[in-house]
Image (cartoon, rainbow, N blue to C red):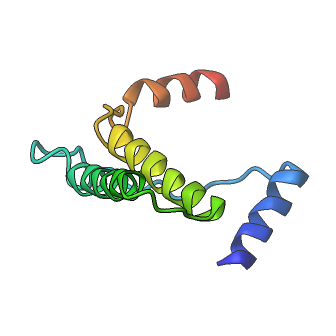
């Protein structure tokens, strides 16, 4: 995969413009919105619960372990929050009109 990224970077650096294939996009159908959010939130709750049990039992853990647990909780909450965001439709016909006007 990296050779294609390298070639694309060279094309972008040289300002190469040319035709490219546009794939059709499908509109997302109504269905369950949050698939991973409950799993990630459960992970965060389990890690926080384990930390609280450790604090109550006066357990001493390394700073690295505490930092890793904090990172897991933070990232799990971020993933859960981003999954609940609304994103625009994958195809906006107004962009085509704007692009055609720019080309002349």
Location of residue 45 with respect to 89 vertically, above or below: below
Residue 12 in the image: state x and y as whole percent. 81, 52
Q: Residue at x 55, y 64 (%)?
A: 61
Which residue in the rendered view is the most extreme toward the left? Answer: 31
Residue 89 in the image: state x and y as whole percent. 32, 35
Image quarter where the C terminus lies is top right
User: Is residue 69 at all visible to an observer of this figure?
Assistant: yes
Residue 77 is left or right of residue 66, and the answer is left
Q: Examine the image and state in which quarter residue 68 appears.
A: bottom right
Residue 91 in the image: state x and y as whole percent. 37, 38
Which residue in the rendered view is the most extreme toward the right? Answer: 14
Residue 21 is left or right of residue 76, and the answer is right
Figure disc tally: 0
Q: Nearer the viewer, residue 74 or 16?
A: 74
Q: Residue at x 33, y 56 (%)?
A: 53
Residue 11 in the image: state x and y as whole percent. 81, 59
Location of residue 68 with respect to 4 vertically, above or below: above
Residue 2 is left or right of residue 70, and the answer is right
User: Is residue 24 at all visible to an observer of this figure?
Assistant: no
Q: Residue at x 38, y 40 (%)?
A: 82
Q: Nearer the viewer, residue 69 or 34?
A: 69
Q: Nearer the viewer, residue 97 or 66?
A: 66
Image quarter where the N terminus lies is bottom right
Q: Examine the image and state in which quarter residue 4 appears.
A: bottom right
Q: Residue at x 20, y 46 (%)?
A: 34
Q: Examine the image and state in which quarter residue 98 appears.
A: top right
């Amino acid at each position: 995969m990296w050779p294609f990224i390298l070639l694309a970077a060279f094309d972008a650096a040289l300002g190469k413009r040319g035709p490219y294939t546009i794939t059709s996009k499908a509109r997302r159908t109504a269905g369950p919105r949050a698939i991973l959010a409950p799993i990630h939130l459960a992970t965060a709750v389990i890690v926080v619960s384990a930390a609280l049990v450790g604090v109550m039992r006066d357990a001493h853990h390394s700073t690295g372990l505490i930092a890793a647990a904090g990172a897991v909780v933070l990232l799990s909450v971020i993933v859960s929050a981003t999954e609940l965001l609304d994103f625009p439709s994958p195809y906006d016909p107004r962009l085509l009109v704007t692009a055609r006007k720019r080309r002349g």
